[in-house]
Image: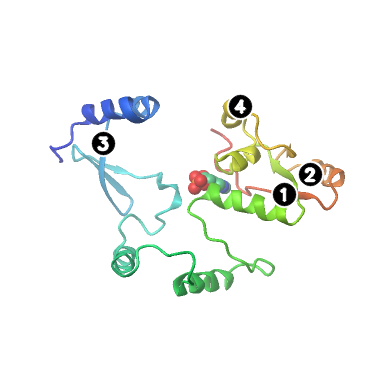
Amino acid sequence: MDEDINPEQVAALYRRTMSSGRARLADVLGGQVEVESSGAWITTSTGERILNVGGYGVFITGARHPVVVDEVQRQLHRHPIGTRIFLDAAAARAGELLTSVTPPGLERIHFSGSGTEAVEAAIKIARLNGRRHLVSMIGGYHGKTMGALSVTARNVFQEPFRPLLPNVSHVPFGDAEALVGVLKEHPGEACVIVEPVQGRAAW
Ligand SMILES: Cc1ncc(COP(=O)(O)O)c(C=O)c1O
């Protein structure tokens, strides 16, 4: 129970300074304000514990796993942000570890802060390599920055922000013939992006 937090005040601040939509959504879900998390559980300001089925897959070890907390604290006390000019041994070791489990041919690592940034980087790398026509699958989700949104073939996300990137084709998920057709139209110039399990296609 956190008596310093007044959920109605927090919702009013959201409405006034950030997002009335978020305030409305929170209202529909009971107007709770989250204050802490541990493992798979969220605690709200009124002391209610709620199973966290969200979390975007970030905390696969659960929130505040002691090993993760210790390591993050150690790094914060030692060197909170890299210069991006000098080299970073931890990043190099992480890259090595990742490439030790990726399939042959996936040998280069680019670290980014979010999924949508990873997709932006992928689009840029594709373009640098002459792959200027993007092909994605209808229903796939790749993020909401402008490049990633251009390949997120869902009208509900794209419509408010058109025009998006040019030279993008969307084909039905699982339709190999349609994909081959687009690839034939753009020989040597296509970059295909697929979300193999379409986690958000249904909503
Ligand atoms: C397959 C896929 N790509 C990209 C993204 C975008 O990631 P982020 O929300 O971290 O920008 C998501 C997010 O759900 C995703 O599931």
The image position of residue 192, as x and y in percent, is: 72, 49
State the CA–CA distance, disc 2 to disc 4.
Answer: 23 Å
Outermost front residue: 85
Q: Is residue 77 above or below residue 168?
A: below
**What residue does disc 3 label?**
33
Q: Earlier in the sequence, mark 3 or mark 4?
A: 3
**What residue does disc 1 label?**
192
Residue type at mark 4 is Glu
State the CA–CA distance, disc 1 to disc 4.
Answer: 22 Å
The image position of residue 183, as x and y in percent, is: 82, 47
State the CA–CA distance, disc 1 to disc 2.
Answer: 9 Å
Frontmost of labels 3 and 4 is 4
Instruction: Give the numbered dot on residue 179.
Output: 2
At horizontal 54% and vertical 73% (from top left) the residue drawn is 96
Residue type at mark 3 is Val
**Crowd rating for badge 4 (residues with CA inside 10 Å; few <14, some 14–19, many 20+):** few
State the CA–CA distance, disc 1 to disc 3.
Answer: 41 Å
In the picture provided, is 60 more to the left or to the right than 155?
Answer: left
Instruction: Give the numbered dot on residue 159.
Output: 4
Q: Earlier in the sequence, mark 1 or mark 2?
A: 2
**Crowd rating for badge 1 (residues with CA inside 10 Å; few <14, some 14–19, many 20+):** some
Residue 173 placement: quadrant: top right
Q: Is residue 10 above or below residue 183?
A: above
Instruction: Give the numbered dot on residue 101.
Output: none
Q: Are marks 1 and 2 in contact (CB under 8 Å)?
A: yes
